[in-house]
Image (tube, rainbow, N blue to C red):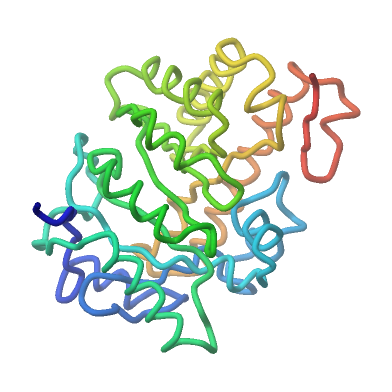
Amino acid sequence: MSRLTAPIDVLTDSTQAADVASSKGPTDIYNDLYRVKQYNKWGIVAPFSHPAEWEFPQPVQVVAERMGLTYDEADRTFLGQLSGCNLDCRYCYRGTTGSREVTPAQYVNEFLCYNIEHFEAPAGVLRISGGEPMLHQNWVGQVVRLVGGEHYVWVDTNLTISPSLGLTRELVGPNVSVNGCFKPGVVDDPWAQIELAKIMVGAGVDMYFYWPSDDGQRYSNLFIDFLECLEEAIPFAPLRLTVIHIKYYYDAVKEKVGNWQEKTEASLKALQLRRYFWREFCTKHYPSWLCHTPSHQVMIG
């Protein structure tokens, strides 16, 4: 019986390695295939300066609360990048530098070994990224099982490939969440993304949705349309049954832009735009008193 493996991108000497090296977070590449990504640069990028400034719970807050971690620990994710994908996004690094086959046990073991070696600044989250993890569903399921709830697992998906019933069951749990990335202009059928979100949230999967960024309001309009469709398709969830889980996606602060002052200014602009659209959405759907709760916990029904 052959071992179950999945291809992980080699990061050393890659285009992405330059991005890692210029990061304000951890800059090491671990054993050629892995990195620790720190999303919020406390005190450097103004919009991220403290979770209290955010409109609704972000992954770093949820992970910290559920796992008893500090924000720094919950903010750092250990990840390998699965090479395969069914989309071809212009900004994606995946699949450009060669890959190595890795078993689920090897993937988890590298995460644990990294934290032992970096005990002074461990990664609180094991992330399964890509590429598209749903192309390797048995592999993803085995990784989640091997972690066994001892650590938080974060799975990415572009919401175009349905998880099997078996994988869906693995993804339901307090220490597992899924990042669903809405991709205007890339995905041919956004209605299929909505249907898949409906299935996963309806099954009890804890989900976040990326809010795409651009220089104007086009993507924000499209994302609000996406939320409108979710509201219609999934009564009471995810926007009514549980805490709103939408993760901001700041193109403006990616390390490919070298000037941190420009990043901060662009981030503030994007943040203000999202706040405007979010207020408009809440005003339409929810009683005003619910929309003024600090964390936007909408608990109707």
**104 left or right of 178?**
left
Choose between 35 and 276: the one closer to the eye. 35
Quadrant showing the C terminus: top right
Q: Position of residue 180 (x, y in %)?
A: 44, 37
**289 left or right of 277?**
right
- Residue at the image point whose x is 27% and y is 20% from the top: 188
Number of dots carrying numbers? 0
Choose between 239 and 263: the one closer to the eye. 239
Q: Position of residue 2 (x, y in %)?
A: 9, 54
- Snapshot quadrant of residue 116: bottom left
- Residue at the image point whose x is 63% and y is 51% from the top: 58
- Snapshot quadrant of residue 242: top right
Residue 33, above or below 58: below
Q: Furthest-top residue in view?
A: 232
Q: Furthest-front residue in view?
A: 1
**285 left or right of 167?**
right
- Residue at the image point whose x is 56% and y is 58% from the top: 265
Residue 225, above or below 70: above
Choose between 116 and 279: the one closer to the eye. 116
Q: Position of residue 182 (x, y in %)?
A: 42, 32
Choose between 169 and 36: the one closer to the eye. 169
Residue 60, above or below 23: above
Q: Position of residue 33 (x, y in %)?
A: 23, 70
